[in-house]
Amino acid sequence: GAVVSQHPSRVICKSGTSVKIECRSLDFQATTMFWYRQFPKKSLMLMATSNEGSKATYEQGVEKDKFLINHASLTLSTLTVTSAHPEDSSFYICSARETSNEKLFFGSGTQLSVL
Amino acid sequence: AQSVAQPEDQVNVAEGNPLTVKCTYSVSGNPYLFWYVQYPNRGLQFLLKYITGDNLVKGSYGFEAEFNKSQTSFHLKKPSALVSDSALYFCAVRLLYGGATNKLIFGTGTLLAVQP
C-alpha cells in the first residue's frame, strides 16, 4: 500500500531554535497534504492544509508565521516550527491525499520536545 | 458547526467479548465518515469508511461500523475483541467545500483496552 514517510520521528531542540519536519509520499503523488497536531489528551487538531505550488491554508488560531509550510513538489511537504518554545512540544502528524484516487495516508508522526 | 464527537475517553472490554466504540457527528449534507486506529507512537491507519450505500460498513481487522442517519451516529463494532485491538481509535468526518480542498476533522479519540 501507499506509504507516507515522516521525518524525523523524534526531535529535541532548545527554545528559540527552528525545527523542520518532512512529510514525503513515497510511491504516489499528493497534491494535498495535511498537518495535524496531537495533544497529550490525544485529540487531533488540524493545523493547515498544504497544496502543491500554492500557499497553505491555515486553520483558525494557527500562526502561519510560526508554523511555516512548504509544499514544493507533489511528494514533499515540510512544516517548520520557527523559534520553538516549550509550549510547541507536541506530536505532529502529516497526511497525504493520493491525487489519483483521493485516498488519505498518514505519516508515523514526529514527537517534538522543546527544552 | 460541523463536528464529530466521541463521548467515551476509554472503553474496557474483555477479550472475546463484543466491543463498541461510539461516534456521533454533526454535519450539513451527507457525511463522509471514517474510522482510524492509532498504535503507540505511530501514525493513523485507515479502518473503514462510509460514503453511501449499505449502512453497515465492513473494514480491516474484523471491524465494522453502522451508519445511523436518524441518530447521526457511526459506531465502531467488533463481534469478538482481541488484546491486539488495544489502541486509540478516531472517528472522522470529511468536510466538503463545493470543489475546494476537503479536509478531515477528527473526534477526540477513544482508547480501547482489551483485557486478556
Image: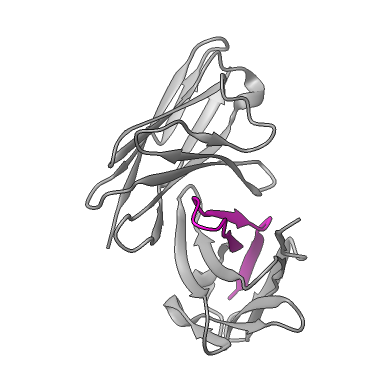
Give the x, y percent position of residue A10: 44, 32
Quarter assignment of residue B91: bottom right
Q: Residue at x 68, y 36 (%)?
A: A60
Residue most extreme to the left:
A27
Residue extending farthest front: B98
Number of numbered discs: 0
Above-or-below relation of A4 to A101: above
Q: Position of residue B53 (x, y in %)?
A: 52, 87
Name the residue: 66% across, 24% down: A87
Image location (x, y in percent) of residue B64: 53, 82
In the depicted view, which residue is nearer to us: B12 or B8?
A: B8
The quadrant the C terminus of chain A occupies is: top right
Q: Nearer the viewer, residue B54 or B23?
A: B54
The foreground one among B73 and A71 is: A71
Residues shaded magenta: B90-116
Quadrant in the picture for residue A70: top left
- The image shows residue B15, relative to residue B89, as above or below, that is below
Please state if B71 lies on the left or on the right of A7 as rendered.
right
Residue B41 shown left or right of residue B78 in the figure: left
Left-right relation of B101 to A22: right
Residue under the point 56% across and 59% down: B96
Q: How is the image coloured?
A: one colour
Q: Is residue A39 magenta?
A: no
**Observer-nearest of A4 and B88:** A4
Is residue B80 placed above or below A13 in the rendered structure?
below
Question: Which quadrant, please, contains the N terminus of chain A?
Answer: bottom left
Q: In percent of the image, x 56 and y 81: which residue is there?
A: B81
